Image: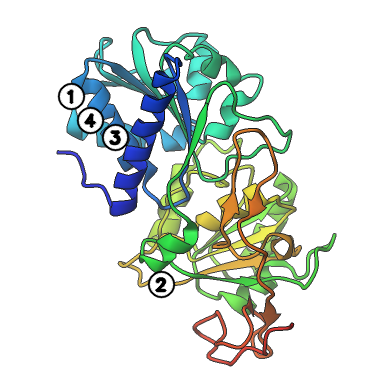
Amino acid sequence: MLPPLRPYQTRAERAIRGAVARARAGGEAFPGVLVVSPTGSGKMIIYLHLAAQAREKGNRTLVTVPREELREQPYRAIRELWPDVRVLRGKADGGDEGPEDASVIVSTVQTLVRRDWLPDNVGLAVFDEGRHYVADDWGRVGAGLMGCVRVLFDATPHRADGRGFRPLASSLVDVVSVRELVDGGYLVPSTIYAPADVQTTLARRPVDAYRAKVPGKRCIVYAARIEHARLFAADFLAAGIACEVVDGKSKDREGPLNRLRSGETLVLCNCGLYVEGLDVVEVDAIIIARGVSLTTLRQMGGRALRPSPHTGKTHAYVLDLLGHSRKYGALDVPYEWSRDGKAPRPREALPSTVQCRKCHAWGPGGGMCTDPRCGAAMPPAPP
């Protein structure tokens, strides 16, 4: 049985179908839709409903994801609904599984590129982290699926190289804002600790920031280089804090994540991983020890925003050691996104923020500190 849609997911699903219908009425046989779907908004539930409609019409669905870690969750969810699902894997990961004539196929984009192969008779293609499918290599997958309906899901659909999404997507659907998700209880509110301005050196060592602001919390540290991640981890271990290092070359990635979930490990220092797609609700905080754009800031921050009732998490923390968040605002500031490669811009002027005199968290002036552990009154907002 299909999981029920939340109200905003119902609106999104209708908006996607409406965009496809309008494009077809305008003469576009195989339209594409870019769907802005923030972290925690439940994009998989939306595309499961779209796949169900495609299946009822006898059309095959292809779901592509950007990494191996993100492949098994949709495969398991789809397998519970329909037995005729196929997953594509390398031999080292157990090989392909499921019937060759499956109505739904799940694969990483790397597998499709490596095999230089696309399944036949695809009526609906779902692209997870859609901004990657206009790159030179992944774009081969997108270009090979122009003969079907394409739905590109992305929380932050913008690329540093300025490439837009035409012709992959002829319309855009904005599902819901982070602020609405927080207000609805689907995400937790967050507090940012950062220096007042962007700087070129870390304001504090990650271990010192951790001990000062989020001691005992489960945390992911983002480093610019592998050697940095290893140095940071050595500092945590020397301080008696359970920590592991993971990078793109690590053979075992699931073990450290499972230990982070259980609390056996408190800190994961990583380079090149966990910017997008990671769903570990137990993560309370992130420490950013590298430069970030708006896109990477939002993606990293999203790793800590999911609520975790079984651990009692009701708040998230961002420790931005270089201050780039001061440029882009809080994680719930709504932005306008574009299909044309234009830089995202705030829907409203970025609100002025002040620093709590007691704990130094950033937030709007005049109210209570955004860190619920503090309880101090914030200074008044500047003019």
Alpha-carbon span between mark 3 and mark 4: 11 Å
Query: Looking at this view, is 269 or 125 the one in front?
Result: 125
Residue that mark 4 sits on: 79
- Report the residue at 60% width, 66% height from top: 318
Spatial CA span between label 4 and label 2: 32 Å
Residue 332 has which mark?
Answer: none
* Mark 3 or 1, closer to the camera: 3
Task: Tell which circle, 3 or 1, labels the residue nearer the N-terminal end.
Answer: 3
* Residue where numbered disc 1 is placed: 83
User: Looking at the picture, does residue 343 appear above or below residue 48?
Assistant: below
Point out the tag, 3 or 4, that comes first from the N-terminus.
3
The mark nearer the N terminus, 1 or 2, is 1
Q: Is residue 14 above or below residue 58?
A: below
Q: Are marks 4 and 1 in contact (CB under 8 Å)?
A: yes
On screen, residue 280 above or below 146: below
Q: Work out which residue is located at the far right of the displayed protein and give it.
A: 200
- Amino acid type of the residue that numbered disc 2 sits on in the rendered structure: Thr
- Which label's residue is closer to the chain start, 4 or 2? 4
Residue ranking furthest to the front = 26
**Secondary structure category for the residue under label 2:** loop
Specify the quadrant of the image occupied by residue 238.
bottom right
Label at residue 314: 2
- Pointer 3 residue: 48
Three-letter code, disc 4:
Arg
The quarter of the picture where the C terminus appears is bottom right
| Cα distance in 3D space between marks 4 and 1 | 5 Å
Q: Position of residue 382 (x, y in %)?
A: 73, 83
Q: 10 Å neighbourhood of mark 2: few (<14), some, or many (≥20)?
A: some
Q: Left or right: 175 with respect to 249?
A: left
